Amino acid sequence: GQQNESLAWFWSVEVDLGGPNHSWNEEFYQVHWLRAKALQDQWKEEIELVQLEMNWTCNFFLWK
């Protein structure tokens, strides 16, 4: 995960958020958000798959 990961150098660069660099700064925030969203979606899918696999395994042994 990302909880123990330190942020890249460009997150600590001081820029005027309303200035000409606003577009690249905003793009970096969007990329970071999209990465976090993709990671969350992957974990949600993993949880769903594990729950289904548990049900399939239990059903198999009950059937046996």
Image: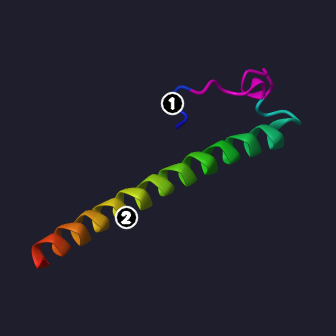
Question: Could you give the CA–CA distance between mark 1 and mark 2, rounded to whole angstroms?
Answer: 24 Å
> In the image, what residue occupies the spot 79% across and 22% down?
13
Residue 12 lies, in percent from the top left, at 73, 21
Q: Position of residue 62 (x, y in %)?
A: 10, 73
Image vertical order of residue 62 relative to residue 6, above or below: below
Residue at point 57% right, 54% down? 38
What residue does disc 1 label? Answer: 3
Q: Give the amino acid at mark 1.
A: Gln
Q: Is residue 15 a member of the stretch shown in magenta?
A: yes
Image coords of residue 56 (percent x, y) = 25, 72
Q: Which residues are magenta?
A: 5-16
Q: Residue at x 54, y 49 (%)?
A: 39
Residue type of the residue flagged with mark 2: Leu
Relative to 10, residue 53 above or below: below
Quarter of the image with the C terminus in it: bottom left
**Helix, strand or loop at disc 2?**
helix
Residue 49: which disc?
A: 2
Judge left or right: residue 45 versus residue 1: left
Secondary structure, mark 1, is loop
Label 1 or label 2, whichever lies nearer to me, is 2
Instruction: Give the mark nearer the N terminus: 1 vs 2.
Output: 1
